[in-house]
Image: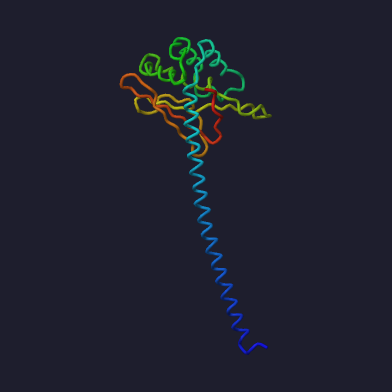
Amino acid sequence: MARKGQFGLDSLFSYIVFGTFLLFTLMLLSISGCGREKVERGLKADAGIILELRASEQLSAYLRTEMPGKEGLIEKARSLYDSGKEDLREGIDIDNAINFIELHPEVYVGKTYAGFISSLYSYKDGSEKGKLQDAFAAVTRAVFYMKVREIRPGLGETYFFPVIKVKFDGGSVNLDSATHVLIAGEPGIATKILPSYGRETMTVQLMLGKEGASLPTP
């Protein structure tokens, strides 16, 4: 038989135990919540690092890609006129580009893509300076574009080409493969300095979004 007042003390003790347990649980949840935030931040940071590493590897693959011969490159450049490739030729004068390619096979024949870029340096201040941007953009798109979506009603085809920028002598961007392209989100950025002659420097930069295409064949 319970003594007088024992039930009240037992109830009070139960409330204290329950309250302590609840407080402890809330503290654990709070701590685990902070942990989740740290984990999420860590994952985002890791994803950013991985994207930058991927961009670096992809830029290296582009730079060591062997360029086509004269007829092959001209044919590729002309293919940008094909129906459905409006996005690939947007913002560039294909005729200007083809004219430069025809007149100056020495900038790409027997060279890698890195060698092609380096060879453009000697024309940056000459009479054909105005054709350099068109030639660089057209060649970059023609050599590396990839179809990423089949024809769909009302959508057509979608093509990927790399966003590559070139700076001469550490200045502003001189050549840009994709002046009209916007990359959603924070891109991975890789930068490499090409071997140069004399005192000039050439910096090549690749901007890669999360939806970037796979590596090209070296």
Q: Nearer the viewer, residue 2 or 82?
A: 2
How are the residues colored? Answer: rainbow
Q: Nearer the viewer, residue 2 or 29?
A: 2
Q: Residue 217's x, y, as percent?
A: 54, 23
Residue that sits furthest to the front in the current view: 1
Q: Residue 176's x, y, as percent?
A: 45, 26
Task: Count every numbered label the image shows and give the total.
Answer: 0
Dividing the image into 4 quarters, which one contains the N terminus? bottom right
Quarter of the figure with residue 169: top left
Q: Nearer the viewer, residue 129 or 194?
A: 194
Q: Residue at x 60, y 25 (%)?
A: 147
- Horizontal side of residue 59 vs 196, given as left or right: right
The correct choice, above or below, for 122 with respect to 160 in the image is above
Quarter of the figure with residue 213: top right
Q: Residue 88's x, y, as percent?
A: 55, 23
Q: Residue at x 54, y 36 (%)?
A: 210
The correct choice, above or below, for 93 with respect to 207 in the image is above
